[in-house]
Image: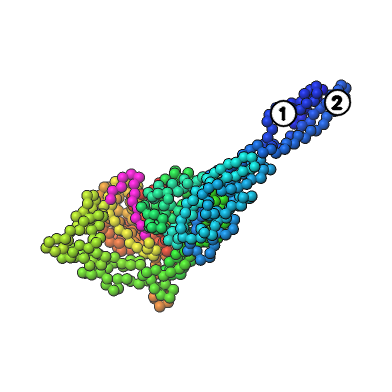
Amino acid sequence: MYQIVEGNNPEVFQLDIFNGDLTALIDLDYETKTEYVIVVQATSAPLVSRATVHIRLKDMNDNEPVLHNFEIIFNNYITNKSNSFPSGIIGKVPAHDPDVSDKLRYKFESGNELNLLLLNADTGDLRLSRDLDNDRTLEAPMTISVSDGIHHVVALCTLRVTIITDDMLTNSITVRLENMSQERFLSPLLSLFLEGVAAVLSTTREAVFVFNIQNDTDVQGSILNVTFSALQPGGAAGKGTFFPSEELQEHIYLNRTLLRLISSQEVLPFDDNICLREPCENYMKCVSVLKFDSSPPFIASDTVLFRPIHPINGLRCRCPLGFTGDYCETEIDLCYSGPCKNNGRCRSREGGYTCECQEDFTGEHCELNASSGRCEPGVCKNGGMCVNRLAGGFMCQCPQGEFENPYCEMTTRSFPGQSFITFRGLRQRFHFTVSFTFASRERNALLLYNGRFNEKHDFIALEIIDEQIQLTFSGGETKTAVSPYIPGGVSDGQWHSVQLHYYNKPNIGRLGIPHGPSGEKVAVVAVDDCDISMAIRFGKQIGNYSCAAQGTQTGQKKSLDLTGPLLLGGVPNLP
């Protein structure tokens, strides 16, 4: 009598107890399991014997090769001087055969008559033809087949050549994706990412150009850096205008939630820390400089071969407008030459000046006279129409809305709940003045915020806290709060004015001459009609006169670098 005593769990084989015939109860597949080991027993009372039986399967060509549609994305950096056209193997046809012993053969069936792709029929290795080393974009669909000698499968291979220019690279930004790998991003999330960016920018998917994906090696965890640029709506590749990197960064920053929903990817705050250590002397400005390397190899996933153009971060120091000296240690008063005409008042600011014009005068330098001059382009703001008067002079006809004469400027804006408005961020790093009027009944509200795109380090925030004005600011090391006080508070629905003056104290040399900035930063906040000097110096002595307050912050950091947008009325709900 015969029986299986070990190794048949689950039950795969059956052993005839009388003649010892061994039968498989299921279809055996080499690709599932190559060998089974069982122990059989033969009994002839009173004798018993056992033996180990090895059942080895032989591989049969019973499976088709697997080949999905795939694309080859060749980002060709034509202005690159290193002549790094990829002349070697860029990858291979992403096919495999479950039958491990099968020998695959590869062949282009159609679409590659010009031999733009060079294919090794035995290995599936792919190369690019030198004919692609030009400045022309290309999209070439081809059909490719794979055969194991018995089975034959066909798929679509699409070759996409994108011409990468210096203009495209200069106007690019890099976003950071959490828990992401290169392979997973390319298959299948690249398509969703392009759709998400296009939706945020109100442009087409074809106007978004991803030219680099690169693992972030400077942090722990799986962070993928994705670098791209985008054409403004209505533009075509080679003809349109790219979003400036600052504007592109602002759009993505404010719409990260939408991008996350469409792309199914966790988009992290920007990393803009390259100049955070303030490596430049005195008033010099640190500028991030990007160079690009097109020598890295193609990246392969299940459905994409992708040629990256790696950005290489660097920096340089330059002396900005409004400063001078061998080491950029001296600030220039740009009002010294009297640039404002017609008795306009010149207000000096960091890196420039502003002209405050007399009544009936306007223009950057108060050069336009509304009483006797004629219309000039741009004199009427916000879509207003300029009309020349018959007796001389001109007037602005303003569109409906919250625009004020005489030049259709917007001076008032209301903020319902969860709303805000954005402006370009403050670019003054060492001193600036911001003043505005507001009316609110909210006990607690955010009036103004300007920070960094990385949501860390330098920022200013002007708020209503318990009906009083409070400024909080940071140069990147500590936080300082400045809290003036007025009786009754500011949440009474009446109009109140706020003035914020921020400045960095200069280093004073041995001869009493200012020589570059110090690490001492000062912020002064005043509310309503306030004698600022009196309130700060003698406010307590003359009876709690505290409509102005001053805060000082010291540290190694010298400048206030605000890279993000200026937000009024609130901040976006960011993830």
* Amino acid carrying mark 1 in the image: Ala
Residue matched to label 2: 48
Residue matched to label 1: 24
* Circle 1/circle 2 CB separation < 8 Å: no
All told, the count of numbered labels is 2
- Dominant SS of magenta comes to loop
Q: Is residue 51 above or below residue 518?
A: above
Q: Closer to the camera, 562 or 459?
A: 562
Which colour style is shown?
rainbow
Q: Which residues are magenta?
A: 413-426
Which dot, 1 or 2, sits closer to the camera? 1
Q: Residue at x 38, y 62 (%)?
A: 427
| Image position, residue 406 (x, y; %) | 20, 58
Q: Closer to the camera, 520 or 132?
A: 132
Q: Is residue 91 above or below residue 379?
A: above
Residue 535 visible: yes
Secondary structure state at the residue bearing disc 2: strand
